[in-house]
Image (cartoon, helix red, strand yellow):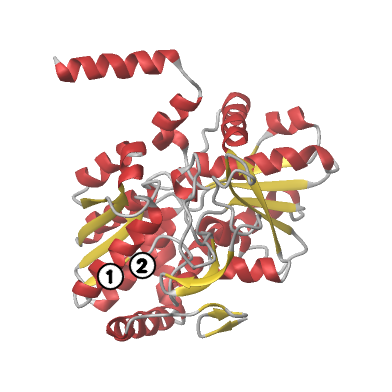
Amino acid sequence: MIDRGYYEGFGGAYLPEILVATFDELEEVFNKAKNDPEFWHEYAEIMSTYSCRPTPVTFAGNLTEYFKGAKIYVKREDLNHTGAHKANNVMGQGLLVKRMGKTRVIAETGAGQHGVATATMAAKFGFKCTIYMGEVDVKRQHPNVFWMERLGAEVVTVREGTRILKDAINEAFRDWVTNMDNTHYVLGTACGPHPFPEMVSYFQSIIGKEARKQILEREDKLPARVYACVGGGSNAMGIFKGFLDDPVELVGVEAGGRGLDSGRHAARLSSQDASVGIAQGYKTYFLQNNDGQMRHTHSVAAGLDYVGVSPILAYLKETNRVRFEAATDKEVVDAMSLTIKKEGLIPALESAHAFVQAFKEAPTLPKEDIILVNQSGRGDKDIFTVADAFADPKWREFIRNKAEEYNA
């Protein structure tokens, strides 16, 4: 499947000459670490003592009873330190940065979870840290901006382009070209030039390895289906890798936004609006026009509105190993609300996309079947967006009162 970063034609490393040596160094260090049993031991050790690995699987008994179909289990990546699966990747890359002897890290972030995780890793290992974040995301994810800055990171607001994740990635690459001697770019998802898709998936595979073992211990059989939301693809690749060789259906759920017919979505693999192209150093499906210019995207979840998708997931779509669906903003808010009320779990808006599809399909499956949903993050970061979506009058009154206090 892999031929120096290509997945049956997807992926690759389309780089300016100035970055080739930096990527060669990264690939060499990563391959040595991957082949060193002590490295994975060091990685697993720090994740167990500094984060919260292994994260549990939780039986959603109330939701199972509500839908009267398959048993619903939830993989609890929201219990990771910093509140999402992002810590798995950044701590692994942090160990590589130490091996390379670099002193500064940079990152892009959309929902802010990757930014917080990177800033946390930098604080832990003593690196300087700069985070690039689109202006739109800075406004809707300001609690995460606050924590990044408290952790010592410089947060740079990106005001060019669509002012979301795509543009933050562009700015991070510009920084790296200028400062590659002492700086490593901690790319947050399974996209970008080789070896990033492979490397991010490698670190995130700890999710699927744990989940497979845990489900077998609990139920003595594998799930019929595994669901994960898909932005760039890191949490999906993480849990899917645990089941790729098993007779388990894998379902990725993209941002349907305001509907696939509206043009206001971020569905690359579940719509007809995307086409194969090359951008940001790799080849995959992008939401682009006939001239190769990237389209505007939309999602209620800041972490899912990326214009491209992991080349590995593109390959898995082409080979029919993963099925892709889309969930609209309204469906996502409704699924989040139901999960909160029935189970006391608060999924991030990103994760709630996976719940939407699981809820649609659970009633159609036999009661003896098991389905597993990856709750990739927790929803407290989304409080402004969620409270607005719920039209919560008490929250609005709270915001008005706070504004009056600041302006007094």
The vertical placement of 260 against 206, above or below, is above
* Residue identifier under label 1: 184
Distance between the Cα atoms at labels 2 and 1? 9 Å
- Label 1 sits on a secondary structure element that is strand
In this rendering, would 78 be left or right of 164? right
Q: Do the residues labelled 2 and 1 touch (CB within 8 Å)?
A: yes
The residue lying toward the viewer, choosing from 275 and 268, is 275
The residue at the point 32 percent across, 65 percent down is 94
The vertical placement of 17 against 363, above or below, is below
Residue 198 visible, this angle = no
Q: Residue furthest left?
A: 408
The disc labelled 2 sits on which kind of residue? Gln
Residue 159 in the image: state x and y as whole percent.
27, 50
Foreground tag (2 vs 1):
1
Q: Which quarter of the rendered picture does the C terminus lie within?
A: top left
The residue lying toward the viewer, choosing from 163 and 196, is 163
Where, by quadrant of the figure, is residue 208 drawn? bottom right
Residue 312 visible, this angle = yes
Residue 8 in the image: state x and y as whole percent.
62, 80
Give the mark nearest the N terminus, 2 or 1.
2
- Label 2 sits on a secondary structure element that is helix
Tag of residue 93: 2
Within 10 Å of disc 2 (Cα), the crowding (few <14, some 14-19, many 20+) is: many
The residue at the point 39 percent across, 65 percent down is 92
Residue 387 in the image: state x and y as whole percent.
44, 25
